[in-house]
Image (cartoon, rainbow, N blue to C red):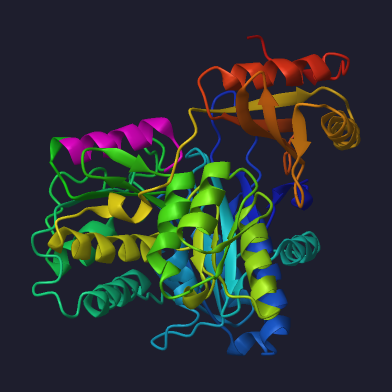
C-alpha cells in the first residue's frame, strides 16, 4: 500500500521509479502515476472550471529511463477522464509551463516528469497551469485525491506535439530582439554548453548555433537517463569543473551549464571562472538592474554579506533575503509585487532564477539567453561577462555543515535548539543576531578579529540542521565553527561532525 503523502516534496512529487540492488522499494509505478494523474485531471477541471472532456493536457519528460512507462500511465489516466493528452516527448520544465501560455498551444495544464538533479532511479512530477506551478497545498490535495482514486489502465490516442522546438524558436526570437542592431547576432561568439546528458542539450544546436554561435567543445548534449558523465547540476563540483575546463580548453567566450530539466543554469566566464551561487545571483540582478532602478531582488537565506553589499551598494537595488526553497522565493516576490513593489527577480543560489517579465518562471534557458545577449554586446566593446559583476567581493571561506538530529521528534528538538541558539547569540558579546530574518538564526560575528556570518536552520524535510558559515579571512570559518560546536556540546541529540 503506497503512502501517497510520502511522495510530496514541497510543490513537487518525488519517488523511486526504478528498483536498484539494495535500494528502496519502488513507490512511483505506472499504476501510482495513473492515480496521481487522474487526481490532477479532477483537480485541474475544478481549477479552470472546465468539464474534464474539454481539457487539453500536455506531458513532457527529461531523459530518465523510467520516463516512458510513467508517461504511458499518465496518458492512459488522462484518456480515462475523456480529456485530450498530448505527448511532448523529451523537453524541459520551463518549456512545459510555456506550453500553457504560448498561443500556439495554450494547454489547460502541463505535466513535467522529472526528478531534477536526483539520481537516475528517482523520478517525479511537476504540474502547471497558465497561472504557474502548483503550490504545496495543491500537491497535498492532488495526493489526497489520488489515494482515493482507482486506476484501471486503458488506451489513449497517440497525439504528439513539439513543444521544445517552438520553445527554442521563442528563445531565438529573444536573442534576435536583444541583438537587433548587431550584425550576425552571435557570429564570432564561441559558447560551450554542458547539458549533463539532461533535457537542455537542444539549447546549443537549436538556439545558439542557429543564431550564429560556435558551440564546438560543448559537453554531454545527448540525453542519457543514466547520466553517465556527471550529475546534471550546476551546484555539483564535478559538473562545474567539467564546464570550466571546456571553456579553458576551447578558449571560449562563455560557458553555460544546465540542470537535468532545464529550470536552472549557471555560467562560466572566459578563462574558466565559474559564475555560480552568489555570483549567478549578482549577474542575474545586474542583467536587469537598468530596467528596474531601485527594484527588489528576493533571494534565499544563505546569500552572502558581500552579495548584499553588491546588490544595494553597487547596483542600487533592494535585497530581500528570504527562505530556502525556490517556490518560497518566487512566492515572496509575487507577494511583494502585488503590494506594489518592483520585485523583478526571485533567485536561489542553486540557480533557480525567475524574472517578473517571464511569468516568475524559474527558467534556466531564459537566464542563459540574457547572459548570452549581454556577453555578445560586451565582446563588441572588448569586455566579457565579468564586467557586469565587477565589485562583487567574495568571502575568503565558505562552509556548509549538516548537523544530524538523532531525536525521534526531530522537528520539535531542532526548534528548541534554534530557540536556545538565538538566545545564546543575542547575549554573546562578539555576535550580532541579524534582523529581519525569515529562516533559522543568522548571525554576524567578530571573533578575535575574524569577521563573517553564519546561519543555522532546519532542513525542509530531513532530520538535519544545515549550518552555513562564511568568513572574510582565512581561518575565520574554523574559529566560528569552534564557538558554535562549543555551544552545541550539551545537546546530546545533535551529532557534531569530527574535525
Whether residue 343 is situated above or below residue 302 in the rendered picture: below
Q: Residue at x 63, y 68 (%)?
A: 333
Quadrant of the drawing holding the C terminus: top right
Residue 362 picture location, percent across and down: 50, 63
Q: Residue at x 74, y 44 (%)?
A: 434
247 magenta-colored: yes
Q: Residue at x 81, y 20 (%)?
A: 494
Q: Residue at x 56, y 50 (%)?
A: 308
Relative to the observer, which residue lies in front, 427 or 14?
A: 427
Residue 475 picture location, percent across and down: 55, 17
Relative to the observer, which residue lies in front, 221 or 361?
A: 361
Q: Quadrant of residue 320?
A: bottom right
240 magenta-colored: yes
Count of labels shown? 0
Q: Quadrant of residue 374?
A: bottom left
Residue 63 picture location, percent across and down: 39, 51
Classified by dominant secondary structure, the portion drawn in magenta counts as helix
Q: Is residue 65 visible?
A: no
Relative to the observer, which residue lies in front, 88 or 328?
A: 328
Q: Which residues lie in the magenta part?
A: 234-248
Residue 101 picture location, percent across and down: 48, 82
Whether residue 398 is situated above or below residue 190 in the rendered picture: above
Amino acid at each position: 500500500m503506497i503512502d501517497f503523502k510520502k511522495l510530496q516534496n514541497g510543490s513537487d512529487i518525488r519517488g523511486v521509479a526504478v528498483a536498484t540492488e539494495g535500494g528502496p522499494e519502488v513507490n512511483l509505478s505506472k499504476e501510482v502515476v495513473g492515480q496521481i494523474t487522474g487526481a490532477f485531471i479532477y483537480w485541474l477541471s475544478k481549477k479552470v472550471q472546465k468539464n474534464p472532456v474539454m481539457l487539453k493536457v500536455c506531458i513532457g519528460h527529461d531523459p530518465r529511463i523510467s520516463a516512458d512507462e510513467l508517461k504511458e500511465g499518465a496518458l492512459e489516466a488522462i484518456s480515462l477522464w475523456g480529456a485530450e493528452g498530448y505527448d511532448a516527448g523529451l523537453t524541459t520544465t520551463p518549456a512545459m509551463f510555456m506550453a500553457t501560455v504560448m498561443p500556439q498551444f495554450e494547454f489547460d495544464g502541463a505535466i513535467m516528469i522529472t526528478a531534477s538533479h536526483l539520481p537516475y532511479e528517482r523520478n517525479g512530477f511537476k504540474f502547471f497551469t497558465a497561472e504557474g506551478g502548483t503550490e504545496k497545498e495543491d500537491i497535498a490535495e492532488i495526493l489526497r485525491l489520488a489515494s482515493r482514486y482507482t486506476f484501471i489502465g486503458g488506451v489513449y490516442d497517440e497525439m504528439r506535439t513539439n513543444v521544445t522546438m517552438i520553445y527554442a524558436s521563442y528563445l531565438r526570437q529573444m536573442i534576435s530582439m536583444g541583438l537587433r542592431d548587431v550584425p550576425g547576432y552571435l557570429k564570432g561568439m564561441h559558447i560551450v554548453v554542458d547539458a549533463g546528458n539532461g533535457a537542455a542539450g537542444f539549447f546549443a544546436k537549436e538556439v545558439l548555433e542557429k543564431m550564429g554561435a560556435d558551440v564546438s567543445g560543448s559537453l554531454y548534449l545527448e540525453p542519457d537517463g543514466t547520466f553517465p558523465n556527471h550529475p546534471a547540476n550546476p551546484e555539483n563540483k564535478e559538473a562545474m569543473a567539467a564546464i570550466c575546463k571546456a571553456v579553458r580548453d576551447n578558449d571560449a567566450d562563455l560557458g553555460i551549464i544546465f540542470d537535468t530539466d532545464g529550470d536552472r543554469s549557471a555560467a562560466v566566464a572566459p578563462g574558466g571562472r565559474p559564475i555560480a551561487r552568489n555570483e549567478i545571483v549578482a549577474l542575474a540582478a545586474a542583467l536587469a538592474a537598468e530596467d528596474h532602478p531601485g527594484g527588489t531582488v528576493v533571494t534565499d537565506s544563505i546569500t552572502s554579506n558581500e552579495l548584499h553589499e553588491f546588490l544595494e551598494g553597487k547596483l542600487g537595488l533592494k535585497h530581500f533575503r528570504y527562505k530556502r526553497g525556490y517556490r518560497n522565493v518566487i512566492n515572496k516576490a509575487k507577494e511583494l509585487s502585488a503590494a506594489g513593489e518592483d520585485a523583478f527577480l526571485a533567485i536561489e543560489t542553486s540557480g533557480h532564477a525567475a524574472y517578473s517579465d517571464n511569468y516568475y518562471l524559474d527558467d534556466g534557458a531564459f537566464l542563459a539567453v540574457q547572459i548570452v545577449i549581454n556577453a555578445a554586446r560586451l565582446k563588441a566593446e572588448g569586455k566579457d561577462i565579468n564586467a557586469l559583476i565587477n565589485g562583487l567581493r567574495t568571502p575568503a571561506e565558505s562552509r556548509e555543515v549538516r548537523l544530524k538530529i538523532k531525536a525521534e521528534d526531530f522537528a520539535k528538538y531542532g526548534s528548541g535548539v534554534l530557540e536556545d541558539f538565538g538566545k545564546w547569540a543575542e547575549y554573546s558579546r562578539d555576535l550580532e543576531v541579524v534582523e529581519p530574518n525569515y529562516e533559522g538564526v543568522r548571525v554576524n560575528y567578530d571573533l578575535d578579529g575574524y569577521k563573517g556570518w553564519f546561519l543555522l536552520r532546519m532542513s525542509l524535510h530531513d532530520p538535519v540542521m544545515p549550518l552555513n558559515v562564511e568568513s572574510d579571512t582565512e581561518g575565520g570559518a574554523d574559529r566560528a565553527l569552534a564557538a558554535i560546536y562549543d555551544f552545541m556540546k550539551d545537546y546530546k541529540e545533535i551529532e557534531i561532525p569530527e574535525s
